Amino acid sequence: MISRRFPALAVLAAVWTLMFSGVAFASGGPADSGSRSSPGSGDLTGGFVVSDLSGETITATGVDKDDNGAIQMPPPDRWKLDPGEDHDWEVVWYLFYSNNPTVHYVIANQDGSTTRFDLHLYLDTGGINAHASCDFLGSTTHLCTVTKTPSTGQMHIQVMDAGHPVFDVGGDKAQQEAQLLNTLCTADGIGDCTFTPAKDEHTQSAPRIVGQALADCSTNESETTLEYSDDVGVSDAIDVKVDGKLLGVIGPPVEATYHHEVTETHTFSQSVDLKIEPGQIGWVSDLAPVYRDTGEFTVALGNSTWHLHDVSFDSPDKGGTGVFAAHGVAMTDAQKAKYCGGKPPGLVPVPDNEVPSS
């Protein structure tokens, strides 16, 4: 939440005007509030954004409020931060009281141990002076930096490793690789990402269903000739969102090394004659020509560095030709009842999940 901050004199003038006119401030959002009800409660807040720039997961475990003060918390599913993620604590401003809550955190270290630390937040009575500090309770494995955005007064707390650890993530840890790339290297990511290609292959995509699969519920063979199109983009085997930012990381080194363009998307098309026998499901597939480039990502965040090995991406070879083919398979009794039962004879659309995968 963006803090709503006003110059001190303007705030005080507005507050006194509202006090004497009998008008109360409106609530600015859900808060874990205490017993205070002074003007400004639940409305004006000071924002404290906590960012995980370490190599570990950081989880908030609880909050201690100062003398029944109030704090607007992130939703429960945002208390846990993976590297590169952040969440926002909004400390409620009071006219006559300072507010000094403490947020408790635990860090899940790579070796299986945990580090606990306390984040102390402070907002004074005028809503002008705000600061934060981290207490790692004697541990020296992590540190935090605290900065303020002058235009908004918002505080930024960045938690990072105290040393300069390097993490190697092999190709057998696809889920971890995907999480790091999606969080740190795509559009909203704050990691510094580079890609070093090591292998280039010219191959084909897996079979892809194009157009509409059809069930022949008639007593005669049906035949259609249509232009089928296959839109092929950049993809990978580990469920990474390949957006423009990540494409900008992959493309230049691949083009410099292997002298082919990493094309974001390309459409292959071909006219195909599809014949479907009575009682069959028919469909058209395409094997798209692709370049498969494999290499290593280096991702830097705070003081931490990751090496992600054996990451592969397929990109369409726009100079190639797709291999389109027609297929047909007999319907099961359940499929006949589902798609043909009680319906007039003819061709009936069938979802792709009814088509055999091979």
Image (cartoon, rainbow, N blue to C red):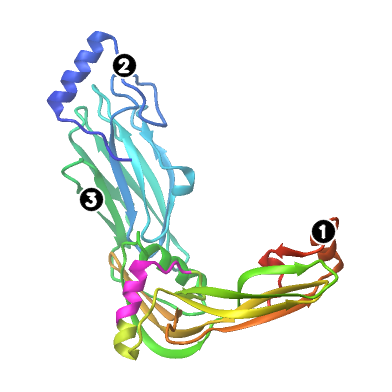
In depth, the one of 57 and 280 nearer the eye is 280
In depth, the one of 127 and 191 nearer the eye is 191
Q: State the residue position of label 2.
A: 24
Q: How many marks?
A: 3
Instruction: Specify the label residue 146 is tagged with.
Output: 3
Instruction: Specify the label residue 344 is tagged with.
Output: 1
Q: How many C-alpha atoms fall within 10 Å of the one at disc 3: few (<14), some, or many (≥20)? A: some
Q: Nearer the viewer, mark 1 or mark 2?
A: 1
Q: What is the CA distance from the residue labelled 3 to the residue labelled 2? A: 33 Å
Which of disc 2 and disc 3 is earlier in sequence?
Answer: 2
Q: In the figure, residue 99 lies in which quadrant?
A: top left
Q: Quadrant of the N terminus?
A: top left
- Callout 1 amino acid: Pro
Q: In the figure, residue 234 lies in which quadrant?
A: bottom left
In depth, the one of 281 and 88 nearer the eye is 281
At x 38%, y 35%, the residue is: 72
At x 33%, y 67%, the residue is: 245
